[in-house]
Image: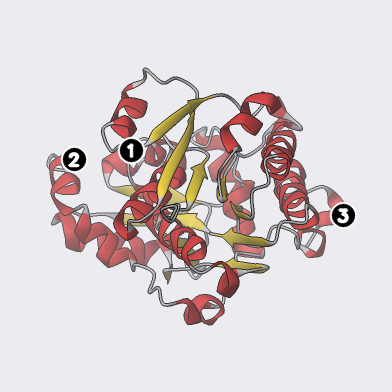
Amino acid sequence: MNPIQKPVILVAGAAGLQGGAVIKALLAKGDVAIRAIVRDKNSEASQALTAKNIKLVETTFDDLAGLTKAAQGATGVFSVQMGSHPGNKGQETRHAINLVSAAKAAGVQQFVHTSVARAGEQEHFVDWDKGRWEPLYWQEKAAAIEAVKAAGFPYWTILKPPYLMENLLPPRDAVMFPMMAQGKLNTPIAPDTKVDWLTGEDIGRFAAEAFTQPEKFNQKELSLVGDKLTMAEVAEALSAVTGKRFEATSLTEEEAISSGLFNWGIEPYIWQNVEGYKIDPQQASGYGIQPESLKAFLERHKSFLQARFAGLA
């Protein structure tokens, strides 16, 4: 009698936040073989994966043959790509299509893709017809989702997170909240705007659960949220955990532009005021996972945060 074969999950972005979270959640569940796509088998991050008995496959999203070889024998694929910007136009769509094509060619049965909340709704955004809200970003996110849905996988799931709580940690904090090191959360986000937040680890938990229960998650587009907070409430939570003073200041659009702090532009912040992710927490409430609150996330990182901000008043 042949032994029962373990499911084999191929994880893209394995050395990154979301792919790494998926691997962590799959390892916690056990009874699954994990295969990780990496660009460099000899990198520190790759070696850390090897230490966990994860098989590494060295390839890139531009290498269709390499991706197809990586997917051979896999039962499921976790898909995540870098977001687009004017300097890499078309890259996210191409990379998503390549991974989808490779999975189909290899006979993969399940495809779990992570995107962003409200991707696919962009044409209904206020002032979309005026070219606002970084159209390329939303269009490529939507194109990747459509490639997954149109491929004909027996099982597919789309996960749609909002802002990640890890944006409050290095290295992301320096980009998203440039004055955070001084205890200041200065953004163009309005004082009464509630931002939707989620941890990368919760993306991993939902993805791992989808691989465990493919029928329950099949053909679902799930927008996920762990907390809804104003920036003042975020500052208050940081203050409570670190014992230091954090304050949130809402900049006008003109102040934000003239500050020169926001290298990636201010539209994503203004979009929060005008549109926002608008995630209904009940949408993903029936899947047995309670997403982490910001307070719990910060408490989990308390020692690090206290050391990082030890010099603040």
Q: Is residue 113 left or right of residue 194?
A: right
Asked if marks 2 and 1 touch (Cβ < 8 Å), the reply is yes
* Res. 78 mark: none
Q: Which residue is mark 2?
A: 308
Q: Position of residue 296 (x, y in %)?
A: 26, 65
For badge 2, the amino acid type reads Arg
Q: How many marks?
A: 3
Residue 271, image x, y percentages: 64, 57
Residue drawn where x is 54% and y is 43% of the image: 256
Residue type beneath disc 3:
Asp
Query: 290 or 269, which lies in front?
Result: 290
Q: CA distance from mark 2 to mark 1?
A: 10 Å
Which numbered disc flags the more N-terminal residue, 1 or 3? 3
Find the distance from the CA under tag 3 to the CA under tag 2: 43 Å
- For the residue labelled by badge 2, is the local secondary structure a helix, a strand or a loop? helix
Asked if the residue at tag 3 contacts the one at tag 1, i.e. Cβ–Cβ closer than 8 Å, the answer is no
What is the three-letter code of the residue carrying label 1? Answer: Pro
